[in-house]
Image (spheres, coloured by chain):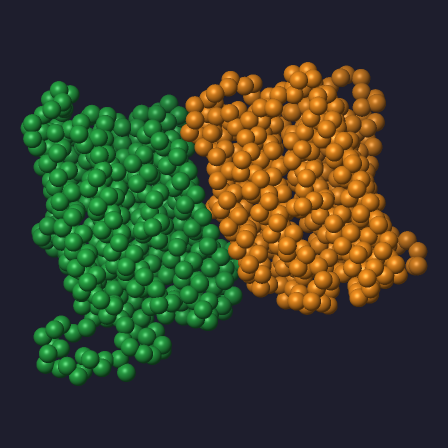
Chain colours: A green, B orange
Amino acid sequence: MNLLTLVIFLPLLGALALALVPRDEVGQHKVLALCVSLATFAASLGLWAGFQSVPGAPEFQFVQQAPWLPSLGIGYHVGLDGVALLLLLLTTILTPVVILSSWNAVAERVKEFLLSILILETAMIGTFAALDLVLFYVFWEAMLVPMYLLIGIWGSENRLYATVKFFVYTFAASVLMLLAILYLYFHDGNSFDYLKAREALDVTPAAARWLFLAFAVAFAVKVPMFPLHTWLPDAHTEAPTAASVILAGVLLKMGTFGFFRYALPLFPEAALSYRWALAVLAVIGILYGAMMSFVQTDMKRLVAYSSVSHLGFVMLGLAALSAEALTGSVYQMLNHGISTGALFLLVGLLYERRHTRRIEDYGGLAKRTPLIAAVFLVVTLSSIGLPGTNGFVGEFLILSGTWLSRLHAPAALAALAAVGVILGAVYMLLLVERVFFGPIRHQENRVLSDLSVREGFVLAPMIALILVMGLLPQPFLTPVKPSVDRLVQRFQAAETKRGGEKQVGTVPPAIARATAPAQAGRGGE
Amino acid sequence: MTGFPTVSFAALLPVAVLTLGAIVLLLSEAFLVSGKRAYQSALTVAFAAAAAGAALLGPRPGPVFDGQAAQDGFSVFVTVIVCAGLALSALVGAAWLGARSSERGEFYALATFAAAGMVLLSMAADLLVAFISIELMSISTYALAAYLRRGLRPSEAAFKYLVLGAVSSALFIYGAALLYGASGSTLFSRISAGQGSPYYLVGMGLVLSGLAFKVAAVPFHAWTPDVYEGAPTPVTAFMAAGVKAAAFAVLVRIYLAAETGVTVKVAAFGGLLSALAILTMLGGNLLALPQRSVKRMLAYSSIAHAGYLLIGVVSAAVAGARAEAVASLLFYLAVYSATAIGAFAVVGVLERRADGDREAAEAWDLARFAGLARRRPLLAFAMAVFLLSLAGVPPTAGFFAKLYLFRAAVGAGFEVLALVGVLTSALGAYYYLRVVLYMYMRPPEVEGEVLSAPSLGVALTAAVLVVLVLGVVAEPLVRLATAAGGLG
């Protein structure tokens, strides 16, 4: 059996087994779900070990292809490139973490909770692995229902409003993508297969622009890009910790992954027409998210808005279309999943102890809970991109890649985005200061307990990843490179076809330009 | 005339079986001694299964009685849908009526007569045969709608249904007369001979209007919410499945026969039906949004689904896309029937029993669904599956039905219709999901008596299995629908 298929469906099989365990055996449910998610993680490490990123290795590996609905041209076709592999690993590592983190936090309807998480895991992995457009859409939409239940059943006070908003926003945006997929079928030699569609696509430039927009809207809502982000603060804030972590860690990446895998490579020429708009919206998102984070009084909402800001970086890097910025974007997807996921875990820990998310209810916690404070600080530093943590690698690559890209006014965009980095440092450090330092103002805070062993196990993998990815980025960058190179080549081919000025890749650095001005100035004919 | 060939009788066997079944059920009531009626629903299921079997094992496809009816894959497919709908509704009806102590043989007999009309309608290839089948189907369903005549709502529903149904029948027969005047024949296949004549235009317009009443297309839909809400719930389920499938079957046959050999650009009625489809999708979905009564919401939802199905009818007029559009329509009808019966069955389980003459407005209120996931987890799960399928969320059968139908529309060049279709189905997600929200995310509000019966369990399990299995392996049914889509 194909290892990738096994990884996709293992959680679903686990969910079926879980469904058979009697409702009252709560302890068994937890242990079973944790074991299933750990087994999935172990299996996904096999994918990591078997993936080849040497030059000449196939673009998609662990490929399996089988007819599914041949009468309609739909096939079961899965495979991984480097980017999908890393995001898949992120998914499989976060799932056991969130199951362990909700060990005590979720006390009601535990069985349904774990069922939702496991079904959601299959849908997420499938979304990254799918190579058939309909299969991709099926997994993409299948994520909605478990997440809808997670937010709506186990969320906090305003959960019903938040979960309906989440569902309607994402569902409405996705149906346009479905229509675009159907249109593609009749213009790529009658196939829903992604690889065939990518090669054989034959649409007019006007149609390509509409199709790009249909895909882009579906993905932009998920990212979320300003101004389609309004579902996110509500959903993140009201969701239970586990769902917040998965939302921030994996589901938002679906949007940026969708751009990277589908919207950009399928319609490169249309993407070139809209990339400037994407870049501007991304920068607005960076600054807007950062400024909104400033004024939040609710910790979870603050972290949620910081996600808008961080995902803006990813989108900026994707719009810049230089190899460096694209690599940075992919890296930042992983970073955001880890650091924001860890932040939500920590906020969840504090909430379990104090049952409030208001920042002003805390203060001086470092004295009582030094371990939590230390971990929180490390995660914060990663989130704001301090050198030595993973955040630095991603943000640096995006900013420098944008600066050297062939976007209009790249320096201005990079500079504005850099302002976002500074703002990010300010609001995150302010949060740390207000929660952990200063005098203890509330008596309740004097009796808080520090990290338990279980919570240590929850956070340890996150801290380890933050440090390893910050100090040794190479093993994570290597599998990304072939995918990024292929995307850049695709765009270079598209711009050759389109003619006119060169638009993708990087401009040579200033020193090189001074010595060869004629070459740089006229590039592209 | 070549006399009455036996092969024609063989083709009518399913209708004969159902008619016989209806008579047997009537007699069973007359000779009933013990007062135990549980076997009547089983008998109905048996006759439905026999009729479906007779259709599946029937003679080779061909014209019946000199082309007045047609026995082909299309009619067989619709026959199986109708028979399955009859069987499921009878099972639901047994539990529902049993709980109200109003189980009678007439109920099953009327439903079986109606099914005979539907089966004949799916085969009709002649305006008069179609009219007679429509009447057989309609008169039986009028009576069924009035079956529980106590209370205001059932009476109102039945009366409204009778009056508006009579109007639509009148429109149909008047249009048929004009078409006969234009073409000199009542056979569907000759209707196109009258093209160009003003009688043809008026006649087709009237015939299509009459059928638009039957399929509940906006603006001919006004009767639907009241009738669907007021009729006994198992009857509503049967109407949503059977009447809809049969009415669409005859609509497809008439429309495709009449508008054959015309490109869509000049087809007189293509634009009209497209407009009807758009209005129906918008109207059905928008009107469903504010409903608090789940039964009424499902009634509007059935209007919305008629709108999606109309896309299939319009697409089928394009020569290159015909086979696929008809196949996708059949697939959609099959999936919708199973889903709608299931959803109405759950509504029937939860609804508050009428208290004498006082008909409670909140008999099907959302509040009755609150906390269902805690009270009856399996029932809530079944309802969630049906609702997600109606909304078209994968991996349910409803998703593939929509995908198939919209694919046919895009392939036929009707991107705009498909666009309206996907956008309105996003609207639909809101009101379907609201029921899920009540079931899973709200605490129980009313301690209502909840129906529980083995026959109901069988029906619900069957419907859930259809929806879930087709959501994963749709291929076999797609093949059957494709084989049936050729229209003999």
Is A348 left or right of B78, judged from the image as shown?
Answer: left
Is A16 left or right of B22, judged from the image as shown?
Answer: left
The residue depicted at 68 percent of the width and 56 percent of the height is B272
Picture quarter with the C terminus of chain A: bottom left
The residue depicted at 60 percent of the width and 33 percent of the height is B296
Q: Quadrant of residue A62?
A: bottom left
Q: Quadrant of residue B297?
A: top right
The residue depicted at 13 percent of the width and 20 percent of the height is A443
Q: From the viewer's perspective, is residue A367 above or below residue B266?
A: above
- Horizontal and vertical percent position of residue A47: 27, 54
Q: Nearer the viewer, residue A128 or B416?
A: B416
Q: Nearer the viewer, residue A104 or A510?
A: A510
Q: Nearer the viewer, residue A307 or B185?
A: A307
The residue depicted at 32 percent of the width and 71 percent of the height is A490
Could you tell me if residue B483 is visible in this image? no
- Horizontal and vertical percent position of residue A344: 23, 38
Could you tell me if residue B33 is visible in this image? yes
Q: Nearer the viewer, residue A353 or A92?
A: A353
Q: From the viewer's perspective, is residue A448 above or below residue A16?
A: above
Is B457 left or right of A133, judged from the image as shown?
Answer: right
Q: From the viewer's perspective, is residue B244 above or below residue B292?
A: below
- Horizontal and vertical percent position of residue B67: 83, 57
- Horizontal and vertical percent position of residue B290: 54, 35
